[in-house]
């Protein structure tokens, strides 16, 4: 692959064969590499080895696990440029965004290296004088992860780092569309001293086969998934048989609200960042905009001007801020959503022009109404529908009128309104006067059909720990 300084990052690449998976650059449609796939029997054998490796790893003291994770963090940062380049080549996001994702991914490794040493239990005041009560936290065991193509490194590290810090092992399936970044970052984990059997990646052309093995294998005690609500539901049902623990980071339908007292320039800046990051392909992207009547025209004019300035193209080219979408199916779905919204009465304020390949022009739709289908769909593309609203009460009802509850955003300068709205929004995350809020130090996750559990933050490691209650009697 062109211009990769550290060839060890790609040592897993293989020659094309019936058992290999081809990876394509969405910006050019060229095949950029092949990786070996694993059969069902090979995945089951890897789970057995993972179980054995976890038996040793859980006995290492937290300080030792932390030291290995810190080395992994450092190696990721030392290879930031190469990893970013690989990511842009297979995922399409602009190089500066890919550099940002590598640092974001590494931040979870550093954070959980530190958290490994802070897995505390409790001493509980006993209700009887001859007893003493305590709790300890222990690693769950072998864990599995299924990660998406939109953040090919950060979603691996956000799951693997807390698992390893807690003393678990992990077997992970990266997305078939973007496995190279995940394999490259795992390669650095091995160089840092993490045993291959402790963190294992597997792929197969049949993602559903891998999912079924993860959900049904008795040695896997936990599944952590990031992806669509539809697939999440299926995996939850499959995990029910074994009563496996799960973390689910699923779809979103984030409202982005601009109140009449907002700083409009800041709101426009936040709206562009929130909507168009990764060409609109994130679960936390602003999905629908609500703008209060009296500032509607001002906001729309400034927002449209900012969107028209966004450069679309190959993520490796200078100045590009919007890369291609991931595949043809995605492009068709976005085009269909725009066409249908137009049929229902939306007006195109900018964009919606024909683009070649997998490129989609950033599009703003105005005069959108709450009853249109676009308001209930996760767009996953660079399209911003704008809805007018009048009162705060009406707005809260509209913003909460969705099965999803991941991220939400609003702009206001009135402290009373800020508290009331932040409390009323039925979402796991609320950005107040900020359009991009993800960080390793804060809990990421949703309510309603956006998922279960939290990633990152002090809560993230608990997802990989069991609480054990100890009762000391007869004292
Ligand atoms: C996602 O879209 O799934 C993750 C986005 C983030 O971590 O900011």
Image (cartoon, grey):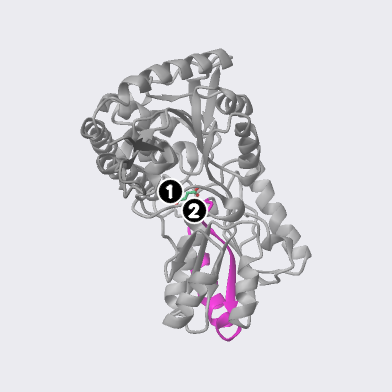
Q: Residue at x 66, y 65 (%)?
A: 401
The image's mark for residue 94 is: 1
Given residues 24 and 424, the one toward you in this image is 424
Q: Residue at x 61, y 52 (%)?
A: 449
Q: Residue at x 52, y 79 (%)?
A: 259
**Residue 420 highlighted magenta (yes or no):** no
* Quadrant occupied by the N terminus: top left
The image's mark for residue 322 is: 2
Q: Residue at x 25, y 40 (%)?
A: 117
The answer to whether residue 249 shows anywhere in this view is yes
* Quadrant occupied by the C terminus: top left
Residue stretch in magenta: 282-311
Is 391 drawn above or below residue 248 in the view shown?
A: below
Q: Position of residue 60 (x, y in %)?
A: 26, 26
Label 1 sits on a secondary structure element that is loop
**Left or right relative to 118: residue 198:** right
Residue 328 appears in which quarter of the rendering? top right
Given residues 20 and 351, the one toward you in this image is 20
Given residues 261 and 422, the one toward you in this image is 422
Label 2 sits on a secondary structure element that is loop
Q: Position of residue 213 (x, y in %)?
A: 58, 23
The answer to whether residue 161 shows anywhere in this view is no
**Left or right relative to 405: residue 131:** left
Is 386 drawn above or below residue 185 in the view shown?
A: below
**Left or right relative to 352: residue 57:** left
Is 368 drawn above or below residue 373 in the view shown?
A: below
Which label's residue is closer to the chain start, 2 or 1?
1
Crowdedness near tag 1: few (<14), some (14–19) or many (≥20) residues, C-alpha within 10 Å: many
State the CA–CA distance, disc 2 to disc 1: 7 Å
Whether residues under marks 2 and 1 lie with C-beta atoms below 8 angstroms apart, the answer is yes
Whether the residue under disc 1 has CB within 8 Å of ligand 1? no
């Amino acid at each position: 692959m062109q211009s990769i300084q550290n060839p060890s990052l790609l040592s897993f690449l293989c020659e094309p064969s019936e058992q290999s998976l081809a990876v394509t650059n969405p910006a050019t449609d060229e095949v950029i590499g092949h990786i070996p796939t694993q059969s069902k029997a090979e995945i089951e054998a890897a789970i057995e080895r993972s179980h054995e490796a976890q038996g040793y790893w859980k006995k290492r003291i937290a300080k030792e696990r932390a030291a290995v994770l810190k080395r992994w963090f450092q190696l990721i940062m030392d290879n930031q440029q190469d990893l970013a380049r690989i990511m842009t080549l297979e995922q399409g996001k602009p190089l500066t965004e890919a550099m940002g994702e590598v640092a974001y991914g590494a931040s979870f490794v550093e954070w959980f290296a530190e958290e490994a040493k802070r897995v505390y239990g409790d001493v509980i005041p006993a209700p009887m004088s001859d007893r003493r009560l305590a709790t300890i936290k222990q690693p769950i065991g072998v864990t599995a992860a299924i990660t998406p193509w939109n953040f090919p490194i950060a979603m691996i590290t956000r799951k693997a780092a807390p698992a390893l810090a807690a003393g678990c092992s992990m077997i992970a399936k990266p997305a078939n569309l973007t496995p190279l970044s995940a394999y490259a970052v795992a390669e650095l984990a091995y160089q840092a001293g993490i045993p291959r059997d402790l963190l294992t990646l597997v792929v197969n052309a049949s993602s559903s086969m891998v999912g079924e093995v993860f959900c049904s294998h008795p040695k896997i005690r936990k599944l952590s998934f990031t992806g669509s609500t539809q697939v999440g539901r299926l995996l939850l049902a499959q995990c029910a048989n074994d009563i496996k623990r799960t973390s689910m980071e699923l779809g979103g339908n984030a409202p982005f609200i601009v109140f009449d007292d907002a700083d409009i320039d800041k709101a426009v800046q936040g709206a562009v960042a929130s909507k168009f990051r990764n060409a609109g392909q994130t679960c936390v992207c602003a999905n629908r905009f609500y703008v209060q009547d009296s500032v509607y025209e001002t906001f729309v004019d400034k927002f449209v001007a900012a969107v028209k300035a966004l450069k679309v193209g190959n993520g490796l080219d200078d100045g590009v801020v919007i890369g291609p979408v991931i595949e043809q199916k995605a492009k068709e779905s976005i085009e269909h959503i725009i066409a249908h919204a137009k049929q229902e009465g939306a007006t195109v304020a900018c964009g919606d022009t024909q683009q070649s390949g997998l490129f989609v022009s950033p599009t703003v739709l105005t005069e959108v109404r709450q009853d249109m289908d676009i308001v209930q769909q996760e767009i996953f593309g660079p399209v911003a529908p704008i809805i007018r609203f009048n009162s705060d009460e009406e707005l809260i009802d509209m913003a909460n009128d969705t099965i999803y509850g991941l991220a939400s955003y609003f702009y206001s300068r009135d402290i009373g309104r800020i508290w009331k709205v932040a409390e009323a929004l039925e979402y796991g995350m609320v950005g107040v006067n900020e359009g991009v809020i993800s960080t390793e130090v804060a809990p990421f996750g949703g309510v309603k059909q956006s998922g279960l559990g939290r990633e990152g933050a002090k809560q993230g490691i608990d997802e990989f720990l069991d609480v054990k209650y100890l009762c000391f009697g007869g004292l």
